[in-house]
Amino acid sequence: MAQRVNQDGTKAAVSSFGRAVLAVLVCIFFVSGCGYRFSPGGDWIDSGIRTIFVDNIVNSTSEPFVEVYIRNGFEEQFRKSPRFRLAGSRETADAILRGSISALSSTYVAYDRYDKATESRAVMVLDLVFEERGTSRKLWSVANFTGNEGYRVDQANPSVTTMNRQAALQKLSNDMAEKAYRNLMSGF
């Protein structure tokens, strides 16, 4: 333990713990003042844009209903947002989110000791555009936005596999909508 001498000539102990705390506080002070901050609140988007319409998603795959899952996922994200409200129609919206599912595939990823599939993975690819309604000015877009989700394969009961796949596609859709929404709000 180090010692320091007070003004009156007495000695006082200075702990290394106290020095460490002081050093951490100084670092936090300087780092917090650097001006960098993450903006998940959509501050970069014009404040006049308050209402959003999530347009029908184009499904270019042979999988039915997946476009509904994606649209519902985006509507849920905007519904939870303190920044935006959902518009009832295109005409009443300040901005429109539109998109398409360009690909959806499944691949077996795990097998049992008899080489029968036990797990599959669904991979989805989206193209998304967020644009101002009045001017059609593109505010944000992403191409080839990809996500994946695994699900159990039941070789003895194909209907269970089908239910697992549908549940995986719904989860994948919600997860992708959430991730894309976060990217949109932060300007990435």
Image (cartoon, rainbow, N blue to C red):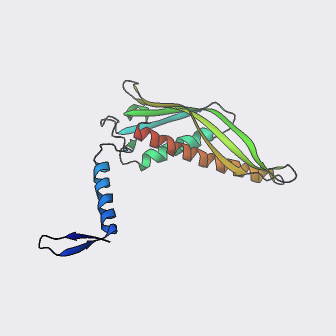
Q: How many numbered tags mark residues here?
A: 0
- Whether 1 is drawn above or below 41: the answer is below
* Residue 25 quadrant: bottom left
Q: Position of residue 52 (x, y in %)?
A: 41, 38
Q: Residue at x 28, y 55 (%)?
A: 26
Q: Residue at x 65, y 40 (%)?
A: 123
Which residue is situated farthest in the left direction here? 8
Residue in front for this viewpoint, 29 or 73: 29
The quarter in which the N terminus is drawn is bottom left
Residue in front for this viewpoint, 52 or 6: 6
- Residue 160 shows in the view: yes
Which residue is situated farthest in the right direction here? 114
Q: Position of residue 139 (x, y in %)?
A: 40, 30
Q: Residue at x 50, y 40 (%)?
A: 180
- Whether 114 is drawn above or below 105: the answer is below
Left or right? Give the position of 158 relative to 130.
right
